[in-house]
Image: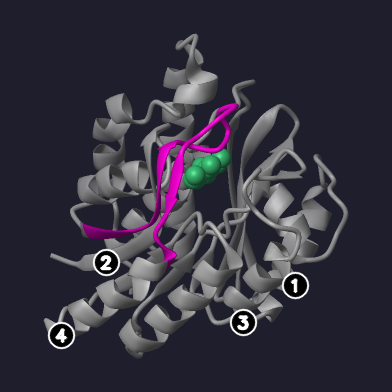
Amino acid sequence: MKRIVTIQDFSCVGSCSLTAAIPVLSAAGVECCGIPTALLSNHTGFPTFYSIDLTDELEPIGKQLKREHIGFDGIYTGYIASVGQIQHIEQFIREFRQPGTPLFIDPVMGDNGRMYAALTDDYPEHMKKFICGADIITPNITEACLLTGRSFNPCPTLHEVKEMLTELCGMGVKFAVITGFSEKGQLGAVGCCDGKFTEYLTPKKDVSCSGTGDVFASALLGAYLRGADYAKSLEIATKFTYAAVECTAEAPDRRFYGIHFQSVLGEYIRLLDGIEKRQ
Ligand code: PXL
């Protein structure tokens, strides 16, 4: 069984970050070790939250894992609470990434044109450096605009999305994916690898809830680790996220409690069972 490590916050309530990554990757048959960057009562989209910063714990945890000769078949980062944490995680990656170990960075920074409440203005420039050399990144439109220095455009054309993807690949990313692209009543993701584009769209649901990007990213990584190629991984992640969003649309409290992916994990497993392994 493959073992990966994911470094992101643990939000006790909100179906996001570690509480999305661990179940989704486990459903993909991957052992998902979680290193929490912060412990939050609930995600920062609620009007208030209580947070314990774990920045100073990252180095001793890494050292201890090294002492036990623990290694990983992949490194996956999600929401990182501060610039200081990015620097600690860069050190962790230098120590644990072997040649061929996939590095998957979800550059979680904001949504709907706004940065998340707890992040500082200098954060995007550090994230921009951090993504260089990643195998896969999955920004949403807001994050892609921040990474490419564009002002926010909620509805870029496919041509504009492709331009941003080309720029992101030019920063040294193998497979760049932009989520939340919408066109003609459909919504989905567009990816680029080696100048070749791939996209998968589903009908658009007017539901906005936290954790959607985290579920998509985890599902894409799970499919990739199960042997799907980039295009198939993007398709599976989009289909599964759509199923979860459909389910969430029926819940009145969805905005705060996050995406209801739990009841459609069976659908994800069925999609993974249909994978033909990449060459
Ligand atoms: O889903 C992204 C996310 C992850 N972690 C925390 C968040 C958010 C978005 O609001 O606040 C703590």
Q: Can residue 1 be seen?
A: yes
Horizontal arrangement in the rendering, residue 17 relative to residue 96 (left or right)? right
For the residue pair 53 and 79, the one nearer the viewer reads as: 53
The label shown at residue 4 is: 2
- Disc 4 marks a residue whose amino acid type is Arg
Q: Disc 3 designates what residue?
A: 172
- Disc 1 marks a residue whose amino acid type is Glu
Marks 4/1: CA distance? 39 Å
- Disc 3 marks a residue whose amino acid type is Gly
Element at label 3: loop
Q: Can residue 73 be seen?
A: no
Of badges 3 and 4, the one in the foreground is 4
Of badges 3 and 2, the one in the foreground is 2
Q: What stretch is highlighted in magenta?
A: 32-55
Horizontal arrangement in the rendering, residue 172 relative to residue 24 (left or right)? right
Q: Position of residue 172 (x, y in %)?
A: 62, 82
Element at label 4: helix
Marks 3/4: CA distance? 31 Å
Q: Disc 1 designates what residue?
A: 167
